[in-house]
Amino acid sequence: MKAAIPTLRLLRTTPFRLALLYLGLFIISVGVILAVVYRSTAGFLEEEIGATIALEVAGLQDQYRSAGLRGLVDSVRERSGYSHTNSIYLLTTPGGVILAGNLSGWPDATAGPGGWTHFKISDYGGVNNRPSTAMAVSFVLPGQFRLLVGRDMSELDQLRGRMVVSLRWVFLVTVVLGLGGGLLLARGAMHRIEAINRTTHRIMAGDLSGRVPRGGGGDEIDRLAGNLNAMLDQIERLMTGMRQVTESVAHDLRTPLSRLRARVELALIRETDDPEVYRGVLQDTILEADRLLATFTALLSIAEAESGANRKGLEPVRLADVVRLAADLYEPVAEEKGLTLVTDIRAEPTVRGNEQLLAQVVSNLLDNAIKYTPEGGRITLLLEGVGPGQAARVTVADNGPGIPADMREKVLERFVRLDAARASPGNGLGLSLVEAVARLHDASLRLEDNEPGLKVGIVFPPDAG
C-alpha cells in the first residue's frame, strides 16, 4: 500500500496529465500517418493491378475484333493455361455455358461502376484453388457473350495482413513508449517539485536558511527556484532586520525612556515652587520625546522602503533639483560649524523614484558629513550624469575620520554606531535608511575611502532613468 501511494499521486499530477494529453495527440498523429501509409501502399498496388487488367482487357477486345469469337476463345484458353499465373479469365455464352477460362462458374457478385467486382475465388475454383479474393472487370461482347478478366489478390491480401499486423505493433509500441515516457517525465518533474515542497516545509517550520535546489539546466523550474530563493533571501533579510530592530529598540530605547521617567519623577518629588525648574524639566522631556519620535519615524521610513510600499508611486524625478534643495538647506548649517560645502552638479539626470525619500537620503548623507567633519573641513556634494553601467551618481564626500573598511557593511545595520560617534547625537539609523531607499530604487550604495574621510555614493542603474 505504501508503494502505491506515490504512484497514485503521480497519476494525479499536472505533468502526468500533460504527458497524457501529449500522448493522446501523438497517438492520433501516428494513427493518421499509419492510415495514410496503409492506404497509399495498398491503394497504389490495387491501382497498378487495375491498370494491368484494363490493358489486358483492351488486348482481348482487339483480339475479338480481329479474329472473332474463335480467336478470343483460343486466346483465353492459352492465357488460362499459363502455370504460376495469378490472372483470372472466364468466357461464357449467353446461356452461361463456359467456353474458356479458369473459373468453375460466374461469380455471384454485383458489379460496381465500370463493371468492376470483388469476389472470393475459392468458391469458384480459381487459380490453384487458393482461398483468396479477386478483383475483376466484366463486360458483354456482341452476341451477348460475357467476358471476365481479373487478378488473384492473394499476394496483396497477404501484404495487407502483414501491414495491419505491423502497424498494430507500431501503434502498440508507440502507446507503451509514450506512456512510459510520460511517467518518466512526470516523475522527474515531481522529484524537483517535491524538493521545492520540502524546502517550503522547512521554512514553515522556522528554518529560514533553507533554499530550493537548482538543477543547473536553466529551465522554467530552475528560474522558478531562482526567484523563490531571491524571495527567501529578502524574507530572511526582513526577518533578521525585524529581529535586530526588536532587540535594538528594547536595548537602545530603554536608557532614554528610563532617563525621561527619572527626570519627570525627580521633578515631582522635588519640593520647590520655582516655575523655571518645572519649565526646564518639561523642555528636557520634550527634547527627549523628540529624539524618540525621530527614532520611530526613521524606523517607519526604513520599513516602508524595505517593504516596497512606495514602489507604486515612483515617478520621474530630476535629481539636480533634489541636490540643489538639499545643498540650500545644509549650506548655512555647514557655515555655522565652520565647514565648506561645495556643490558640483555636472548633469541634469532624471530617474524614476520617490522625490521625498531621495531628498531625505541626500539630507541624511549631508547631515552625517557635517556632524563628523571637524571644523575647517570640506564637504563635496557631487551629481554626475550617465556613465558606463549607470544612469546617475550622487556622491557626498568629506575629510572627516571616515569609516574603517571592515566596518562599512556593519554601519548599514540599524542602531549601529562607531565608538567615535557615540558622543554625537543620533540613533544609528541614518545609513540604514539610505541603504533601504537605495534598494527601493534599485540603486547601489557604495562607501569608499576619501583619503582622508568618507565618500558615500548612490549609483542608479541605467533602467532607472
Image: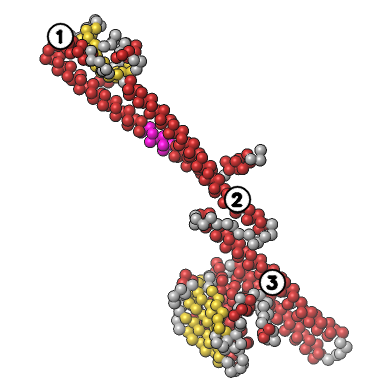
- Which element is circle 2 on? helix
Instruction: Provide the residue span drawn in magenta.
Output: 28-36
Tell me if residue 12 comes above or below residue 249 in the rendering.
Answer: above
Q: Amino acid type of disc 2? A: Glu
Classify 10 Å Cα crowding around label 1: few (below 14), some (14-19), many (20 and above).
Answer: few
Q: Residue at x 63, y 76 (%)?
A: 410
Closer to the camera, 29 or 278?
A: 29
Circles 3 and 1, Cβ within 8 Å, touching? The answer is no
Measured Cα–Cα span from mark 1 to mark 2:
89 Å
Principal secondary structure, stretch drawn in magenta: helix
Q: Quadrant of the N terminus?
A: top right
Query: Could you tell which of marks 2 and 3 lies nearer the N-terminus?
Result: 2
Q: How many marks?
A: 3
Classify 10 Å Cα crowding around label 2: few (below 14), some (14-19), many (20 and above).
Answer: few
Query: Could you tell which of marks 1 and 2 lies nearer the N-terminus?
Result: 1
Q: Which residue is label 1 attached to? A: 70
Residue 271, by quadrant, is bottom right
Q: Residue at x 67, y 86 (%)?
A: 420
| Left or right: 456 in relation to 137 | right
Circles 1 and 2, Cβ within 8 Å, touching? The answer is no
Q: Which residue is label 3 attached to? A: 245
Q: Amino acid type of disc 3? A: Val
